Image (tube, helix red, strand yellow):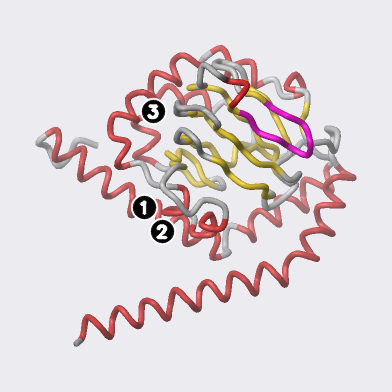
Amino acid sequence: MESIREMKAAALLDALRAARRRYVRSLGKPILRSIDRYIAASSLVPDQPVLDSKAFPWVAELEANWRDIRAELDEILKFREHIPRFQDVSADQYRISPDDQWRTFILYGFGYQSRLNCELCPKTTAVLQRIPDLQTAFFSILAPGKHIPRHRGVTKSLIRCHLGLMVPQQREQCYMDVGGVRCVWENGRAFVFDDRYPHEVHNDTAEERAVLLIDVERPMRRRGVVLSRIMLRLFRKTAYVVEARRNLVLWEQRLQAHLAKKSGSSDMI
């Protein structure tokens, strides 16, 4: 009887959290649009869907180290069942990915570091630590046939980069459309884009696709930087980020338990 009450209470709490997210999202949209317009006007890079990678010097280092990064991804994929689906970490992702075909191994999320995951990928982490104003970094792994419908990112304060690590042989059939611009991944190459433009992903192949996804702060004039950082600081306090951090910690604990059991040592990490 007690467990039934607890289950009902948990279900009610989840429903209330979902309602709160919808309310905050609806209330915040006009404010975010106004902030995005100001940030676009303050931007030191063009306000367009896909940007010139040469404007971001750190992209060259990413590409130069892609084989080391790919080697660490290969090791991570050996325990892929312990890599969470994106919606297992961020419940809001159920809206665009309700299945089990999109998995994410998170190293950094909105400025917070996953200690365990970074220790498992030391070479990747070393490269990431040299990227100025890094906010988020994770391996994004799509199953064969996966389609992510059209959606937008949360803020124009961030610029996104994809480094191709595991690209299907029929790579023209594995692509992302960003604001009408078709982007095709290539092993060892990166492209930079503004995810506030509507974008969607197709993996119309029989192979898995994996990239290193990175978010950095948008280069801006001083007033834009101040506004952007205030907003990012406030965003970290929302349920969107707080709940995702809590979920990630739970997945880290499961992974650590698995690795400890596999090695026969409770203090492997």
**Quarter of the N terminus within the rendering:** bottom left
Residue type at tag 2: Arg
Task: Report if the CB atoms under discs 1 and 2 are less than 8 Å apart.
Answer: yes
The x, y position of residue 190, in whole percent, is: 63, 22
Please name the residue shown 51% across and 15% down the image. 65
Q: Does the magenta stretch include residue 182?
A: yes
Query: How far is disc 3 from disc 1 in space, using C-alphas?
Result: 17 Å
Residue, far right? 41
The x, y position of residue 245, in whole percent, is: 45, 55
Decide: few, some or many residues near mark 1? Use Cα within 10 Å; few <14, some 14-19, many ≥20: some
The x, y position of residue 269, in whole percent, is: 24, 37
Residue 24 located left or right of residue 83: right
Is residue 125 something that shows in the picture? no
Please name the residue shown 59% across and 35% down the image. 202
Looking at the rendered structure, which numbered label has been put on residue 185?
Answer: none
Task: Report if the CB atoms under discs 2 and 3 are less than 8 Å apart.
Answer: no
107 relative to 8, above or below: above
Looking at the rendered structure, which numbered label has been put on residue 121?
Answer: 3
Q: Where does label 2 land, which residue? A: 246
- Depth order, front residue of 107/15: 15
Query: How far is disc 2 from disc 3 in space, using C-alphas?
Result: 21 Å
Please name the residue shown 48% across and 22% down the image. 166
Report the predominant secondary structure element of the magenta stretch.
Answer: strand
Looking at the rendered structure, which numbered label has been put on residue 249?
Answer: 1
Highlighted range, magenta: 175-183
Residue type at tag 1: Val
Residue 168 located left or right of residue 189: left
The secondary element bearing badge 1 is classed as helix
The secondary element bearing badge 3 is classed as loop
205 relative to 231, above or below: above
